[in-house]
Amino acid sequence: MTSAVRFQNVSRHFGAVRAVDNVSLAIAPGEFFAMLGPSGSGKTTCLRLIAGFEQPTAGHIEIFGDTAEGLPPYRRSVNTVFQDYALFPHMTVGENVAYGLMIKGVARAEREARAKQALALIKLPGFETRRPGQLSGGQRQRVALARALVNEPKVLLLDEPLGALDLKLREQMQEELRALQHQLGITFVFVTHDQGEALSMADRVAIFNEGKIVQDGTPADIYERPRSRFVADFVGSSNVMGPDFAQRHGGPASWVSLRPEAIRVSAAAGIAAPGSADGQVIGLHYQGALTRVVIIAEGTRLIAAVPSGSVSLHEGDRVRFTWDRTALVAMADE
Amino acid sequence: MMAARAGTVSDFFFRRPGLLTLALLAPPLLWIGVVYVGSLFALLLQSFYHLDDFSGLVVHEFTLSTYAQLAAPANLAIITRTVTMAAVVTIAAAILAFPIAYYAARYAKGPMKALFYLAVMMPLWSSYLVKVYAWKLILAKEGILGWLAAQLHLTPALNALLATPVIGGPSLSISYIGTFLVFTYIWLPYMILPIQAALERVPKTLIEAAADLGAHPGQTFRTVLLPLALPGVVAGSIFTFSLTLGDYIIPAIVGNSRPFIGQTVYALQGTAGDIPLAAAFTVVPMAIMAVYLTIAKQLGAFDAL
């Protein structure tokens, strides 16, 4: 099957900076693909390489089987939702949404009808005559989405589209984007630095660091089986333990990760057996449904996430953390 | 007490912000209100008087006869000549300025940007008269342009250009072409800077968004860049257009002897002593600018502001 987007050893260097360094990836048609990483990790440059705003220094890019390198953005059947929305301030909402159709030479009546449809799709019916300046951030976001979708792109690129929205709106948009993607069946490539967003929305996640993809897989894969210290650190606040610690507790002789949810907390009594550790509570962070308990045990900082209300603890209490040996996930020292 | 120490004046104004605004605005308001608008009003008033043909004295009675004189063929020719020159200079300046401004706004960084500002501003630091006389030498028959044309075996082409009716003449320095070149040179910075300022404010992502939506560079220029830079172009053209309309030195030094509005005003208020007609002539550029700005507003030139 032809990939929607395929990178073959793609690099993009800016002088001495290797923004994208020998990246290979394949995104399946209809997939919701998230590129996750800290800022400067190369994820946005990858998106810009697909859009055509950047050209690769080396390597080969295909979009639905067609060679993309050397092709300007206006000759690619992909559309972008920009981080700052990039709505044209001198046009109405209707003109913004119909812009791509106007450029293609679609007759006025048809493009107005299609713009209307697109605005209905993203739940802003009747907004045609407003100006972008009169809209809220969430509404601009939707207009940017409509402006891209009206062109029926083969791949929709989203560059941190929810970054500027407040939490409640962001959660709502996450659901809507997901639903929209299912409804339209378009391949979505989504760039974000928010791990929660990537894990909850995407079919597949690629973790970027220093211009390289360090791991890709389903959200569950990434979350439960991080392959390196970087991934474990970056995706959620996992416990990361050195080889010594792991071996003492019956784990492998390598760095391991341990999810905070996999730890049980009890009162310390007697001597801690392998697979458990005692320590003094140095932090208690209430987070609604869960409370995070922080201890220092054997010189390692450990965090457990327990259901709030299941334990009554105070800072300074001595507690025991217990986990199953299988919960220790071996990973590379990177 | 605290208030007794330094800063008493600040404390006083802090409690009366309106008074501070008034104190700051009073001097400029007096200047603009009395000196500037006042003298314009006096000028306007003069244009409604007329000169007595026999005594050569100004008759202080309301009349429109002075304005009627503007419609005389010789005077109309002066107005048409000046307005045409101003329009052509403005268009040429806009065409020349846009790519320079675009480069400076989009691509120039650090030292290149400093060099750009220096290159654009430096001509404004030197004397206007020196520059105009320098151009007279450059454009003279034995000047460097004539010499260059000869070296490139282009003298026939230059002669053919100078043989063009109306805009031609015995040499570049004695022709409308010369006047046009000098005007365009002198006012160009006033066009570059506002366009550059307008282009700086156009986010790069808007250009990318247009390309992303299928617009090739020409379409992006027409549908996004130009509309958003238009306030800058209009601001620049206000400078080039009105400065050309009012200038009386350049056409006196470089060009044929046919007068422009500025020269006419200068002659009328001086040797002729016809202050009313000079005032009426002065009102012409103001009226033209008012019409121009109204049209620009109608066309939506200020929508993106």
Image: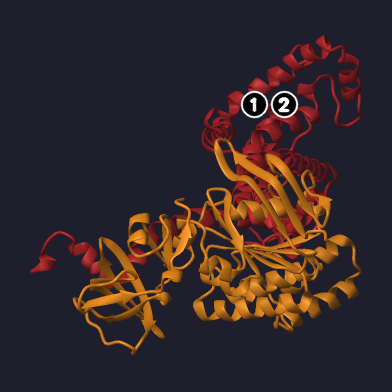
Measured as percent of width and height from the top left, residue B304 is found at: 66, 62
Q: Residue furthest left?
A: B1
Q: Earlier in the sequence, mark 2 or mark 1?
A: 1
Residue B81 horizontal side relative to residue A229, left or right: right
Question: 10 Å neighbourhood of mark 1: few (<14), some, or many (≥20)?
Answer: many
Which colour scheme appears in the figure? by chain
Q: Which chain corresponds to the colour orange? A: A
Which chain's residue wears label 2? B
Which quadrant would residue B124 be assigned to in this image?
Answer: top right
Residue B219 visible in image:
no
Element type at mark 2: loop
When the figure is inspected, residue B205 is found, relative to residue B248, above or below; the finding is below
When the figure is inspected, residue A148 is found, relative to residue A58, above or below; the finding is below
Element type at mark 1: helix
Q: Residue A285: which disc? A: none
When the figure is inspected, residue B205 is found, relative to residue A113, above or below; the finding is above
- Callout 2–callout 1 Cβ contact below 8 Å: yes
Measured as percent of width and height from the top left, residue A309 is found at: 33, 90
Q: What's under tag 1, amino acid-wise?
A: Val
Residue in front for this viewpoint, B83 or A333:
A333
When the figure is inspected, residue A88 is found, relative to residue B151, above or below; the finding is below
Q: Residue B254: which disc? A: 2
Q: Which chain corresponds to the colour red? A: B
Residue in front for this viewpoint, A65 or A150:
A65
Question: Dot 1 corresponds to which residue?
Answer: B132
Measured as percent of width and height from the top left, residue A123 is found at: 70, 83
- Exactly how many numbered labels are in the figure? 2
Residue in front for this viewpoint, B295 or A135:
A135
